[in-house]
Image (tube, rainbow, N blue to C red):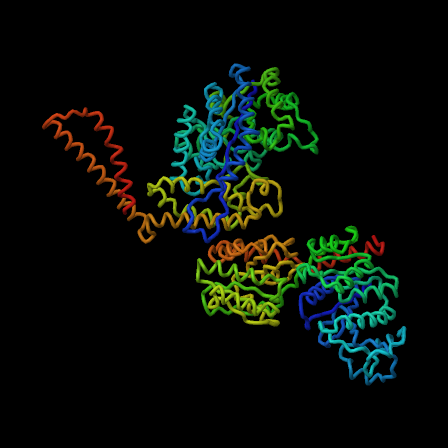
Amino acid sequence: MRALMFGWEFPPHILGGLGTASYGLTRGMAMQADMDVVFVIPKPHGDEDQSFLKIVGACNTPVVWRDVSWEHLESRFGSYMNPQDYYNMRGHIYADFRYLYTNDLGCIEFSGRYPENLMEEINNYSICAGVIARTEHFDIIHSHDWLTYSAGIHAKNVSGKPLVIHVHATDFDRSRGNVNPQVYGIEKNGMDHADHIICVSNLTRETVINKYHQDPRKVSTVHNAVEPISKQIEEIKPERNTNQKIVTFLGRITMQKGPEYFVEAASRVLEKTSNVRFVMAGSGDMMEAMIRLVAKRGIADKFHFPGFLKGSQVYRMLKSSDVYIMPSVSEPFGISPLEAMQVGVPSIISKQSGCAEILNYAIKTDYWDIDAMADAIYSIISYPAMYEFLKIQGKKEVDEIKWEYAGHKVRAIYDRLLGIK
Amino acid sequence: MKTICFYFQIHQPFRLKRYRFFDIGADHYYYDDFTNEQILQRIAANSFLPANQVIYDLIQASKGKFRVAFSISGVALDQLEQYAPEVIESFRKLAKTGAVEFLSETYAHSLSSLIDEKEFKNQVLQHRRRIEVLFGQKPKTFRNTELIYSDDLGELIYSMGYKTIIAEGAKTILGWKSPNFVYHSALNPNLKLLLKNNKLSDDITFRFSNYNWSEYPLVADKFIDWIYKTPNNEQVINLFMNYETFGNLQSKQSGIFEFLKALPKFAFEKGIGFLTPSEVSGLVNATGPISVPNPISWADEERDLSAWLGNDLQQEAFKKLYSIAERVRMSKDRRLHLDWNYLQTSDHFYYMSTKNFSEGGLYRYFSPYETPFEAFINYMNVLSDFMERVESQFPSSVENEELNSLLTTIQNQELKIVSLEKELKKKCKKGKPSKTPGRTVKKENPADSRKSTVKKGKSS
C-alpha cells in the first residue's frame, strides 16, 4: 500500500509539535513491510532522513514548463532528489500557471514556515499538490493539519482516492474559542471532504464533532506516541550546580499553554518552601506579561526565563529538572510531558490536555486549579517516595507508548476505507 | 447438623478533607465532616437500620435460633455515635437478645498488626473495652483488619487470650481443601480458624443482583439447597461479608432483605442451624492444621496485602506514619491520640493503590479521590502536619529512650508526691481528726494525680 501524505514540517527543521508527530507516525508506519509513504512538504532542506520514506518538496515541483538540463537539476537538488522525478512531474503540468511568480526551474518558492502570506502559500501548495497527485501512484491520501487540507482535497479530486485528514489541532485550541473565520472555513472544508478524520485525542475528537459538525462515525482517535530517545540524548549528563529543586515549564509562552497559572502556582509554593527554583523556557507573545507578573508576585529571584531552547538544550534542561509541568488551557495532545517522562522527570499535566487520556503515572489537575497544581509540585519536591514512584513508573509507561502501535491503528483505518479486510 | 455462621463487618473511615500543603502548621482539623456525615447517614438509613430490624425480627421469630456475629471497628463506632446514634441503640437491642456476638478487632481498623506489635495490642484492648461498655459482652473471637492473617499473627493474637480467629478462605492456603471445616493454626493446635466460604459469601455480596450471572436470580431456597447439598461431613458454612451488602451494595429493590428474611425458614426446614463464631469454635473440633506463612487478606483476586501496601507510595506513607508511633504513645494529648487513630485506618492506604489502572471498578467506587496520587498528596500533607504536632510536644533531638526515662522520672515523682500527700493527710488525721471522712480523700487522689501529670507532661 502506498500513501500520499501532505505535511508542513519534517525534522530536523521543525517549528512545533506537528513536525515531530508527522515524523513519528511515518516512522511507525514504515515498520509495516508493505507500507510506502510519499511525504510532501513545502520546502525540504536536504538533510531530512529519507531512509524510510520518499520526500517530495513542493518547491521542487514544476508548475510551468521550462527546458532545463539534467546537470543543472543535479546541481540544484541532486543530493536529495532524483532529477528524473522532476521530468516526470513536468510532464503532468495541468494548467497554465505562467501568471504566477516562478523561478528558473518553473517552481514556486516556499518559505516552509508560517509567514505573513500564509494563505497564499497554502494555495500555492495545493497547486503543486495537483501536479504531484497526477504523477505519483498511491492508494490513499493523508493530510496533516489544516495547512494541507486543500492540497488533500485537490489530490482527492484529481485521483479519486480516499482522503484521510489528521487533526493535530483545531483553531479552537489555538485561540481559546475566538476562532479565525478563514481558518475555520479551511478546516471545516477539509473535514467535510474527508472520507475519514483522525484526531490526536478524544478531546479533539469532541471538538471536531461538536464544533465542526462532523458525523461521529467518520471521526476516530489515534493518540500520538513518542520516539524512543536516542543514544546521544541518553548520554547527556544532567547538570546540577545547586541542590535546590527545579520545576520546569517548556513551550511557547502563549495563551494556549496557560503560563500564568504556572507563575501563580509557583508563588504559592514559594510561600511555604524556598528550596526550589522555577524555569519557564520558551518564547511567545505572553513572555513580557509573564516577566511582569513574576516581578509583581515578588518571586523574580526564584523564577527564570532562559528563552527559546533548541535541540539538545531541551533535554539538558529536562534532565536537570525535578518536575515538569504543562498547565495548558487546551492542548490537542501535548507530546512534551511524554518526552520529560522518558528522561525520568515526574510530570504534572492539565486535565485539558489530550495526553492526559493515555497517561496514568502523571499528576493531572485542572489548568485553573492553582492550589492543586501547587500541591502537586510541593508533593513531588518534598516527598521522595512520590518523586521516585512517578520517575520509575512514568518512564515505564511512556516506553510502552510507541508510534508503531499508532501506525497499526492508522493502517486499520486505511484498510477499512479501501475495503480490505 | 450443618451450621451457617454469619459474620458481618461494619466499618467506615474518617475521610480526610482536601488538605493543601499550605494548611500544614495552620490547620489541625483533618476530616471531611460533610462527606462523612452524609455517607454514614445514608448507609445507616439504607442498610444498618433496616437490616438490624430484619435480624431482630428473625431472632425473635426463631426464639434465638437465628444467630449472627458483628465486627464493628472503633472508628465506625465513633462515627455512628456522632452521626447516627440510633444505630448504636439498635445494636444494643440486638445484643440484649443474646443471639448476637460482637467480635474483637483493632480500634482504628488499622494495619498495625503488620508493623507495630505494641500499637496493635493497644488498639485491640481499646476496642475490647469499647465493645464491653457498649454491648456488655467480652469479645472472644478475633477478626483482624481486612481479614489479614498469618501464622505469626495468630500466635500474637492467641497470646492476647483469643482462641478463635476469623480468616479468609484463600485458595493459596487451602489448595484442594474445603473452607467448610474448622481448622487450627499450624503453630498452635489450640487456636481455631474459621475460614470464609468465598463462593457463597460473594454470591450474596457481589453477584446477588447481577443479571449476567447464570444463577440469577438468587433465591433463599436455592441458596439453602446449595448448602444442603455440600458433602455430609462439611459442617460449617462461614458466610462473612460487609454488612453494607444489605441495602447499600445490593439495593433494597434487588430484594436482598426479603432474601435475608427467608433464609432461616428454609434453613430450619432442611435442618440447618445457625451459630456465632465462638459457639462454632466451642462445639466443633478442628479437622487439621492450616499453614499461612505469608499474610493473607480478603481483598482482590490475589488475597494479599497489595491493595494497601502494593506500591512505593503506600509503603512510604505507612512507614512514615509508624515512625512516630512511639512518640505518640508517650504523649497524653487526647486530641493527638484521636487523630492518631483516625490516620491509621487502612482505607487511607487503599485509596493510594495504583492497581486500579488495570482493574478499575472497586477502588474507584470506594475512593473519594480521583487518582491515587491525589490520595497520597492529601494524606502526606495531613501526616506532615500531624508529625509537626508530635514534634512540638517532644522535639526529635531527644532520643526515644532518653525521653522515656525522663517521662518515667516525672511519673515516679508524681506517684511519690501522691503517696507522700496521703501519708501527710493520714498523719494530720491522726493528729486532729477532721470532719471529712477518709473515703472522699481516696477518691480525690487519683484525679488529682492525673491532672498534674498532664500539666507536667506539657511543660516538658
Residue A27 in the image, given as x and y percentages of width and height? 72, 65
User: Would you identify the image quadrant in which residue A164 lies?
Assistant: bottom right
Q: Where the N terminus of chain A falls, by quadrant?
A: bottom right
* Residue B182 in view in this figure: yes
**Residue A30 seen in the figure:** no
In the visual, does B218 lie left or right of B22? right
Locate residue B73 relative to residue B448 in the image: left or right: right
The residue sitting at 41% across, 34% down in the picture is B124
Residue toward you, B171 or A94 = A94
Name above or below for residue A162 compared with residue A242: above
Q: Is residue A153 left or right of residue A285?
A: right
* Residue occupying the point 44% across, 35% down: B106
Front residue of B285 and B345: B345
Q: Residue at x 46, y 60 (%)?
A: A270
- The image position of residue B3, as x and y in percent, is 55, 21
Residue name at image x 64 percent, y 32 percent: B207
Q: Position of residue B327 (x, y in %)?
A: 35, 45
Residue B282 lies, with reference to residue A414, above or below; the image says above
Number of marks:
0
Tell me: residue B350, above or below residue B77.
below
Residue nearest the observer in this picture, B198 or A194: A194
- Seen in the picture, residue A229 relative to B194 is either above or below; the reply is below
Instruction: Residue A56: name its quadrant.
Output: bottom right
